Image (cartoon, rainbow, N blue to C red):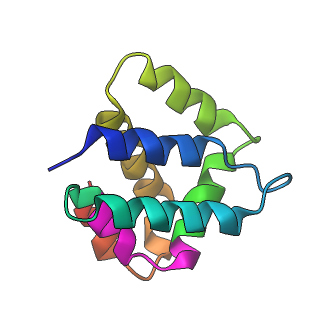
Amino acid sequence: MHNNTFSTELLKIIMTTDSFSFDIDKHIKNIRGLCATYLEQDRTAKSLDKLNDTEVKAILRFVEKPHGRHHIAELEKMLKEYDSASVLKIFMKHFYEHEGHKLIHTDILKDML
């Protein structure tokens, strides 16, 4: 089951990612805490919790590509039309298509889709 509150909170963290002005490790810590809160209620939280910190960092770095805010602007646009659980799924699929092959836990990421 997907929890829209979890997706909303996760997207807030993802969309505030800016490695030049913010400690990305704090974002990872916030994501870990969020996953712990929703672990029993949300299957995405359960899957995301299984990724290691390097993989979570790769997701956060991906948001910044290309040219800084491109993905963030797309997420903001999609949130106006779709619920946050759908937007998160679209984003994770996009990430998987571009970067998934580089991760250790590719199977976990694929299960999130």
Residue at 44% in and 17% down: 80
In the figure, residue 70 lies in which quadrant? top right
Position of 101 with respect to 67 (left or right) is left
Position of 54 with respect to 111 (left or right) is right
What is the chief secondary structure element of the magenta stretch?
helix
Q: Is residue 76 magenta?
A: no
Q: Is residue 65 visible?
A: no
Residue at 28% in and 74% down: 107
Q: State the image coordinates of residue 90 (x, y, percent, origin top left).
A: 36, 40
Q: In front here: 10 or 58?
A: 10
Q: In front here: 34 or 24?
A: 34
Q: State the image coordinates of residue 57 (x, y, percent, origin top left).
A: 60, 67
Q: State the image coordinates of residue 35 (x, y, percent, origin top left).
A: 38, 63
Residue 55 against residue 98 in the figure, above or below: below
Residue at 79% in and 55% down: 22
Q: Which residues are magenta?
A: 45-55
Residue at 76% in and 41% down: 67
Residue 104 against residue 32 in the figure, above or below: below
